[in-house]
Amino acid sequence: MNEILENVVLADSVNRYLVAAPKIAARRKAGQFVIVRIDEFGERIPLTIADADPEQGTITLVVQAVGKSTAQMATLKPGDRLLDVVGPLGAPTHIERVGTVAVVAGGIGIAPAHPVAQAFKQAGNTVIAILGARSKNLLIMEDEMRRAADEVIVCTDDGSYGCPGLVTHVLNDLIDTRGKPDQVFAVGPVPMMKYVSLLTREYGIPTMVSLNPIMMDGTGMCGGCRVTIGGHTKFACVEGPDFDGHLVDFDELMQRQAFYKEQERVAYERYVQRCRSQEHIAQANQSL
């Protein structure tokens, strides 16, 4: 089993885990992910590898606690072990020297954008990273992105840090003032990727997006991660997660992402209630 070496809170409900996984660290490439299972009763969680250190044999995972399993994962401490960490999975991001690359990332999407920015920079490109968050306290990995990119532009929805507004506003301003980048890579909430792709389509800028649909086995067997690309069905776990943003059916993807929202809500509420009950019992025992 894979030991958790660090568990650091980056923002509200967002944790960074340093996990011992030497074989994965030695093989992973930008854009690839792992599937994690906390224990024998846990569901399979697909998580992008935010960074890796082959010499130390570690990978970095950045996880937002949005459901039962990710909330449970947030309670783990250094020394605890994950039952399964399977990977690296997925096709690596296609990296080549094209000139100037704008890496556009929103929210938790900044984590999977990090290794992509690193790889484009190492390939000899000029990398401009546009980072978006709802507010300053939700922005993650700014320092890491500044080390990975030539330039970082930060924006927040509420204007509490950086430029006020959305990543699409910043990208549009960048195009207007400096000209079109040679390529755009976008990762973040599905609506954000949709509107980035709509914008770049107008300018004819090649655009790749990283998709994270519902996923089970990570091998293309279950079909849960299917997405429609240019009218054809693709499996994100083996043919992605990166696809041409101008060909993705984002509206269908958003509908599919909402299929199990009610079940996820119920599972999370039951987990929170169980934790509160256990805490109440522990407090009662201490008072005896």
Image: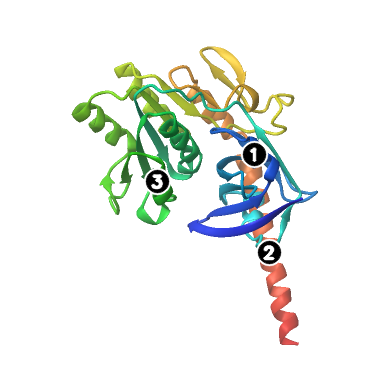
Residue 147 has which mark?
A: 3
Please tell me which of labels 1 and 3 falls first in the chain.
1
The C terminus sits in image quarter: bottom right
Question: What is the residue that sits farthest to the bottom in this orientation?
Answer: 288
Tell me if 54 is positioned left or right of 158 in this view: right
Name the residue: 73% across, 74% down.
Answer: 281
Q: Does 46 sit above or below residue 144?
A: above
User: Nearest the camera: 197 or 101?
Assistant: 101
Q: Amino acid at mark 3?
A: Arg
For residue 180, what is the image quadrant? top left
Question: What is the residue that sits farthest to the top in this orientation?
Answer: 231
Q: Nearer the viewer, mark 1 or mark 2?
A: 1
Q: Nearer the viewer, mark 3 or mark 2?
A: 3
In this figure, which residue is indicated by the disc labeled 1?
26
Could you tell me residue 65's position as x and y percent?
57, 52
Labels 1 & 2 near each other (Cβ < 8 A): no
Q: Tell me the SS state at disc 1.
A: helix
Question: What is the residue that sits farthest to the left in this orientation?
Answer: 177
Residue 275 has which mark?
A: 2
